[in-house]
C-alpha cells in the first residue's frame, strides 16, 4: 500500500485488481470526514476501495508534513483501504489544469475503478471546487486513446459526490447510507487527524468532533437509523433492485 504524502507512483495495472470505487479527496481527511463510514461499510461487504488524496493538505495552522503523514497512515489503517495514494498537487493551489487532469486520469486508468466519488460541487474552499472539476474532467480524460498516459483506457461508469463542505448549506442529498455499524470506526479515522480536528480548536462544547457526530446523527435520523452519510448525484441513480432500500 502506498501511504505517504509525496507523489505516488502510478500502480501497475497488471499487478493490481480493479477497484470497485475510488474516492478523490482534495486533502487527506476529506474522504474520512465526507464518507469514511460508507468506505468502511463497503470494505466490510468485500468491496475494493481506494482513496486518492490530491495534495498533502499542508501547510495548516497546527499540522506539519510529518504529523500529516503519520495521521494519514493511522486513518488508512483504521479504514483498511485497498489502496491510498497522493497525487502530489499543490495544497491551496489546486487548479483544473490539463497537467493535473492527466495526472488524476492516469491513476484512474491504472486503478480502473467502477465508480468515482468527488467532493460536492458547491463549496467555499477553492481546492474543493477544483478537485470536483478535476475529477469530472479526469473521468472523461481517462478514456482517451492515443495518449502518453499510463494504463489502459478506462471510463468509470458513475460519478457521485460526497459532502465535506465549507459552507453552511441546507443540502438535499440524493441518498443517505446507514453507517451506524461503522460510526465508531469513522470517528477513530477522523480523530487520527488530531492536528486538524483537536489541536488548537475550542474545547467548549460543541467541539468540532461533537459537530461531526451531530451531523452523522442528523442524517441518520432522516433515514430512521442512528448515523448516516449523505451523497449527491447529477445523473439519476440506476438500481439493480429495490431490495436494499430502507
Ligand atoms: Zn479539504
Image: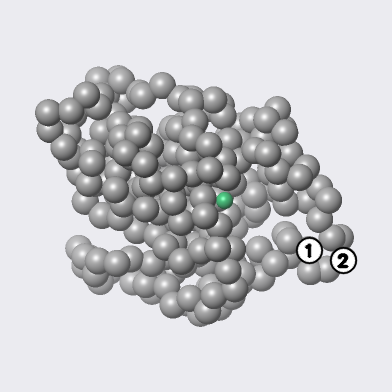
Q: Quadrant of the C terminus?
A: bottom left
Q: What is the basis of the colouring in this image?
A: one colour
Mark 2 Cβ and ligand 1 under 8 Å apart: no
- x and y percentages locating residue 219 in the rendered image: 53, 73
Label 1 CA crowd tier, 10 Å (few <14, some 14–19, many 20+): some
Q: Assign a secondary structure to mark 1.
A: loop
The Cα–Cα distance between marks 2 and 1, rounded to whole angstroms, is 6 Å
Give the label on residue 204, or none.
Answer: 2
- Kindly tell me whether residue 128 is visible in this rendering: yes
Residue located at (29% from left, 67% from top) = 234
Mark 1 Cβ and ligand 1 under 8 Å apart: no
Give the label on residue 86, or none.
Answer: none
- Kindly tell me whether residue 108 is visible in this rendering: no
- x and y percentages locating residue 203 in the rendered image: 86, 60
Horizontal placement of 230 versus 102: left or right? right
Residue assigned mark 1: 207
Residue located at (38% from left, 46% from top) = 96
Do the residues bearing badges 2 and 1 touch, measured as CB atoms within 8 Å? yes
Closer-to-camera residue (203/98):
98
Q: Assign a secondary structure to mark 2.
A: loop
Residue located at (57% from left, 40% from top) = 91
Amino acid at each position: 500500500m502506498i501511504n505517504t504524502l509525496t507523489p505516488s507512483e502510478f500502480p501497475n495495472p497488471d499487478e493490481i485488481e480493479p477497484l470497485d470505487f475510488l474516492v478523490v479527496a482534495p486533502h487527506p481527511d476529506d474522504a474520512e470526514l465526507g464518507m469514511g463510514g460508507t468506505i468502511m461499510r463497503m470494505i466490510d461487504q468485500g468491496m475494493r476501495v481506494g482513496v486518492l488524496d490530491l495534495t498533502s493538505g499542508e501547510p495548516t495552522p497546527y499540522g506539519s508534513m510529518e504529523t500529516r503523514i503519520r495521521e494519514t497512515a493511522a486513518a488508512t489503517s483504521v479504514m483498511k483501504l485497498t489502496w491510498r495514494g497522493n497525487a502530489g498537487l499543490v495544497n491551496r493551489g489546486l487548479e483544473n489544469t490539463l497537467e493535473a487532469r492527466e495526472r488524476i486520469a492516469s491513476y484512474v486508468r491504472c486503478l480502473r475503478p467502477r465508480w468515482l466519488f468527488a467532493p460536492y460541487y458547491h463549496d467555499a474552499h477553492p481546492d474543493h471546487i477544483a478537485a470536483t472539476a478535476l475529477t469530472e474532467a479526469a473521468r472523461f480524460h481517462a478514456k482517451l486513446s492515443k495518449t502518453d498516459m499510463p494504463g489502459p483506457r478506462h471510463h468509470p461508469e458513475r460519478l457521485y459526490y460526497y459532502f465535506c463542505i465549507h459552507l453552511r448549506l441546507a443540502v438535499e442529498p440524493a441518498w443517505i447510507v446507514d453507517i451506524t455499524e461503522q460510526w465508531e470506526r469513522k470517528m477513530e479515522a477522523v480523530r487520527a487527524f488530531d492536528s486538524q480536528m483537536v489541536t488548537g480548536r475550542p474545547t467548549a462544547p460543541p467541539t468540532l468532533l461533537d459537530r461531526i457526530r451531530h451531523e452523522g446523527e442528523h442524517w441518520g435520523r432522516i433515514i430512521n437509523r442512528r448515523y448516516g452519510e449523505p451523497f449527491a448525484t447529477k445523473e439519476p441513480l440506476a438500481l439493480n433492485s429495490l431490495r436494499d432500500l430502507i
